[in-house]
Image (tube, rainbow, N blue to C red):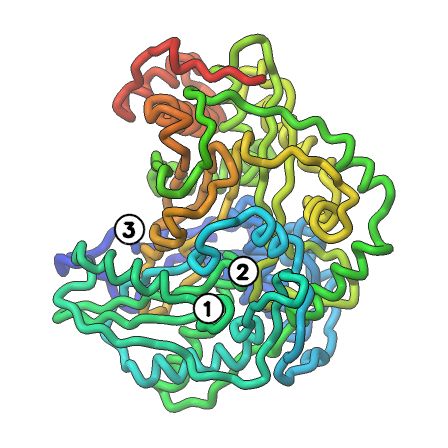
């Protein structure tokens, strides 16, 4: 059956012409309409949630979660929305069921609002990632943030915006946290009883895209104070014809999932005020304080001995830099190489490649990076250690729900990949999948063992490894009726120039503006720009070559020929044996 999309209006670009990128894709073809429509109220509810999370109205109950481009963060969004509607569900149910039909066959209605909805006050134990920060960061602790600089598609009411933020500050307890040192000179955190006024500034500018804005952004980033506050604030910039919003929070209290929650609430609350409707914020899930207490107890008596043995037996492999450098690696010395894949290729990779190889986007990207690195490896070494970042919201406990809790939950853990001598990306994907399956509890135990109970006494640090972080579909932080434009990004002025870097190279991947963006951060005292550019281009070539191999199997071109064509299309690359990257 052919389903024709219905448009209320055409979206226009800045020149007043039709924005073809915002037109819906080709209509979905269904073999049998009965195979894709809901058969009961639970499926109807779940399907509506999927359509909102994926921002796709042409989804049926038999569509596969991963083939639609689903990732771990999107699974958390689905679980969060389902629980707010009274459905008992967890991330594992989504990963195992994969379709609305199969997931709903196990889902049950449960009561909502069981979590205490009152203000959280009092001291909160530091979580593993917070202890990592205080243990490893030495300079300018106040200036280590996450922020979003969001251009608005219209001017908005400053007073309504401030009231909206005040609701968020009251509802999400972690945003009211303060830090101080105890009598033993150790950092502690506590939730304030008083709900102070949200710090929102109004700044008039000529144009919000003016280069001079960067100085204002840096000034506001520096204004956060761990001990006296604020550590969460905003600035509304209004130009003659445009407007933008800066939201800043210290990284100690937010992560990527938190931003999705904050922005969802901000958009909904503002629109409710604007329409003079009752303000409705979804019920709180368990607080950051409850999660921290649970981790503390778990670290003392809840970790299986096999998990401890797994992390203590891990073999860590360092990488060699281009240049010898004995100084501290600082943000001041950081450079970045960015490379992207267009929206059409990205869509095909997400939907078709992942289906054929039965793998996630994270696995495809890791395998492509490993294959690219393997082709550069010298000295016969065939293994490398990654410092992988995860969302950290693993379902360790059955009696706690943090799916809609704001806070810094990130997990960081080492994974050593072998067989870098394998030249085929499809074979490398299987190795990546098998290796990640070995990691217990999504890697969250590593930080607990190292920073809470010190059972991992490994003195080796991460600053000889490669960091990898896949942020997923970043566009989906915003709903279709948002007053924010879709090209939102984390602000580049988040860290003090004196902040310490913790990986030799950080590879950050995300889907934004419907295209895949890869960013490679490095210290220019340790690597040449030619080396990083070569690695970035090679990784892109591997991703695109995999796409062509799977989606154009009848092509008579060899993979090597495809790679040469892709390299030429992306500007080519110079051969330089000095840039061969060896491992040790």
Q: Nearer the viewer, mark 3 or mark 2?
A: 2
In what element is the residue under mark 3?
helix
In what element is the residue under mark 2?
helix
CB within 8 Å, label 1 to label 2: yes
What's the mark number on residue 32?
none
Left or right of 97? Residue 427 is left
The crowding category of the residue bearing disc 3, from other C-alpha atoms within 10 Å (few below 14, some 14 to 19, many at least 20), is: some
44 lies above or below 164: above
At 58% across and 79% down in the image, what residue appears? 192
Earlier residue among tags 3 and 2: 3
Q: Distance between the residues labelled 1 and 2?
A: 9 Å
- In x, y percent, where is residue 64? 59, 48
At 47% across and 26% down in the image, what residue appears? 546
114 lies above or below 224: below
What's the mark number on residue 231?
1
Give the residue number, with chain letter if any, for mark 2.
252
At 65% across and 71% down in the image, what residue appears? 287
Left or right of 546? Residue 121 is right
Q: Distance between the residues labelled 1 and 3?
A: 37 Å
- 218 or 276: nearer the eye? 218
Residue 291 can be seen in this image: yes
At 58% across and 25% down in the image, what residue appears? 318
Give the residue number, with chain letter if any, for mark 3.
21
The crowding category of the residue bearing disc 2, from other C-alpha atoms within 10 Å (few below 14, some 14 to 19, many at least 20), is: many
Earlier residue among tags 1 and 3: 3
Location of residue 104 by image quarter? bottom right
Residue 2 can be seen in this image: no
In what element is the residue under mark 1?
loop
- In x, y percent, where is residue 563? 38, 18
């Amino acid at each position: 059956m052919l389903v024709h999309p219905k448009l209320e209006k055409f979206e226009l670009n800045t020149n007043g012409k039709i924005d073809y990128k915002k037109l819906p894709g080709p209509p979905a073809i269904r073999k049998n309409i009965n195979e894709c429509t809901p058969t009961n109220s639970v499926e109807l509810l779940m399907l509506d949630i999927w359509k909102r999370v994926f921002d796709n109205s042409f989804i049926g109950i038999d569509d596969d979660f991963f083939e639609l481009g689903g990732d771990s963060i999107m699974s958390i969004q689905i679980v969060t929305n389902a629980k707010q509607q009274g459905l008992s569900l967890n991330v594992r149910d989504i990963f195992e069921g994969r379709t609305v039909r199969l997931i709903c066959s196990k889902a049950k209605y449960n009561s909502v609002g069981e979590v205490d909805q009152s203000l959280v006050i009092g001291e909160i134990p530091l979580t593993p990632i917070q202890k990592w920060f205080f243990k490893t960061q030495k300079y300018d602790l106040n200036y280590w943030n996450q922020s979003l600089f969001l251009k608005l598609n219209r001017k908005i009411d400053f007073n309504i915006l401030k009231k909206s933020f005040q609701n968020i500050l009251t509802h999400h307890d972690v945003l009211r946290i303060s830090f101080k040192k105890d009598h033993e000179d150790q950092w502690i955190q506590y939730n304030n009883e008083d709900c102070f006024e949200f710090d929102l500034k109004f700044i008039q500018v000529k144009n919000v895209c003016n280069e001079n804005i960067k100085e204002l952004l840096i000034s506001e980033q520096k204004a956060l104070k761990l001990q006296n506050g604020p550590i969460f604030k905003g600035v509304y910039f209004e130009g003659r014809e445009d407007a933008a919003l800066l939201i800043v929070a210290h990284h100690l209290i937010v992560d990527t999932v938190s931003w999705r929650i904050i922005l969802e609430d901000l958009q909904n609350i503002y629109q409710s005020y604007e329409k003079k409707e009752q303000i409705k914020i979804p019920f709180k899930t368990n607080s950051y304080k409850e999660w921290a207490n649970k981790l503390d107890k778990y670290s003392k008596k809840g970790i299986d001995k096999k998990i401890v043995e797994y992390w203590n037996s891990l073999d860590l492999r360092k990488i060699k830099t281009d240049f010898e450098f004995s100084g501290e690696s600082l943000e001041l010395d950081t450079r970045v190489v960015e490379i992207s894949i267009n929206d059409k290729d990205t869509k095909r990779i997400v939907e078709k490649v992942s289906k054929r190889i039965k793998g996630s986007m994270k696995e495809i990207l890791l395998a492509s990076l490993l294959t690219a690195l393997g082709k550069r490896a010298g000295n016969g070494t065939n293994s490398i250690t990654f410092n992988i970042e995860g969302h950290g919201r693993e379902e360790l406990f059955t009696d706690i729900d943090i799916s809609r809790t704001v806070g810094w939950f990130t997990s960081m853990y080492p994974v050593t990949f072998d067989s870098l001598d394998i030249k085929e990306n499809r074979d490398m994907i299987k190795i990546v999948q098998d290796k990640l399956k070995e990691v217990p509890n999504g890697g969250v135990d590593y930080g607990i063992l190292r920073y809470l109970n010190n059972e991992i006494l490994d003195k080796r640090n991460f600053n000889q490894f490669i960091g990898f972080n896949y942020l997923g579909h970043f566009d989906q932080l915003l709903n279709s009726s948002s007053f924010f434009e879709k090209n939102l990004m984390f602000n580049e002025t988040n860290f003090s120039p004196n902040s310490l870097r913790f990986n030799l190279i950080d590879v950050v991947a995300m889907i934004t503006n419907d295209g895949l963006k890869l960013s490679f951060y490095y210290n220019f005292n340790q690597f040449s720009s030619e080396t990083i550019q070569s690695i970035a281009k090679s990784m892109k070539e591997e991703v695109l070559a995999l796409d062509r191999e799977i989606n154009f199997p009848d092509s008579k071109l060899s993979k090597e020929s495809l790679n040469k064509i892709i390299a030429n299309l992306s500007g080519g690359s110079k051969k330089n044996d000095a840039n061969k990257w060896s491992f040790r």
